[in-house]
Amino acid sequence: MADISGRHSVSTGRVLDAALLAMIAGTLSIVAIQVAGDDWFPPEVSISQYGVGEYGWMLTTTLLLLAVTSALLLWGAHRLAVARSWPVILPWTVWIIALIVMAFVPTNEWPEPLTLTGQVHQAAAVCGLFAAPIGAVLMVGLGTRSAPDTVGKRART
């Protein structure tokens, strides 16, 4: 995989390595939420329940790590000419913005009716979870057509 980033001081391989590290940190933070809350089972309603209570900052951290990972992956794919069209960039951007909104706009305790912030949080979750797989499929599908010389090759650092 050739680094076609031009005069950039950071190689594409390093960008993708940073995405991997952020992904690992996000995964570990999800485990940390369960350890800190002494609850090894998934929440009854949604992962947003982790954001309510004394460990709510951990969900914020996890969602922000997922947003950073997604942004780094999009940046790396853009530098490899895999994500240079709006049909790919738009759903990824919606996903990243949705993660940031979910991180900073908390939901409320269940089974209480959703407050305004809970509705905003839920709308961001729906938009993000709708856009993420579309963006991923389009990136892979359009990316393999537009940059066949990069598929299956290792990145140079």
Image (tube, rainbow, N blue to C red):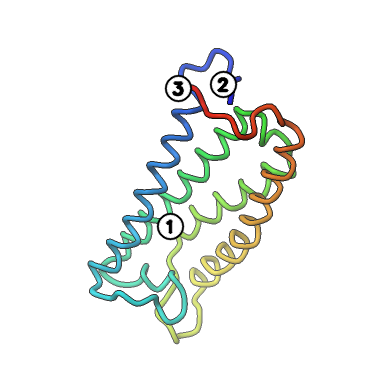
Q: Is residue 9 or residue 49 the one in the foreground? A: 9
- The kind of residue tagged 3 is Thr
Q: Which residue is mark 2?
A: 3
Q: Is residue 55 left or right of residue 104?
A: left
Measured from the top left, where is residue 35 in percent x and y? 24, 67
Q: Is residue 1 or residue 109 the one in the foreground? A: 1
Quote the CA–CA distance across marks 3 and 2: 8 Å
Q: Residue furthest front?
A: 152
Rendered residue at 48%/60% (across/down): 102
Rendered residue at 31%/60% (across/down): 57
Quote the CA–CA distance across marks 1 and 2: 35 Å
Rendered residue at 27%/61% (across/down): 32
Measured from the top left, where is residue 107 in percent x and y? 45, 71
Is the residue marked by circle 3 packed among few (<14), some (14-19), or many (20+) residues within 10 Å?
A: few
Mark 1 or 3, closer to the camera:
3
Q: Is residue 33 above or below residue 145?
A: below
- The kind of residue tagged 1 is Phe
Q: Which dot marks residue 157? A: 3
First-in-chain label (1 vs 2): 2
First-in-chain label (3 vs 2): 2
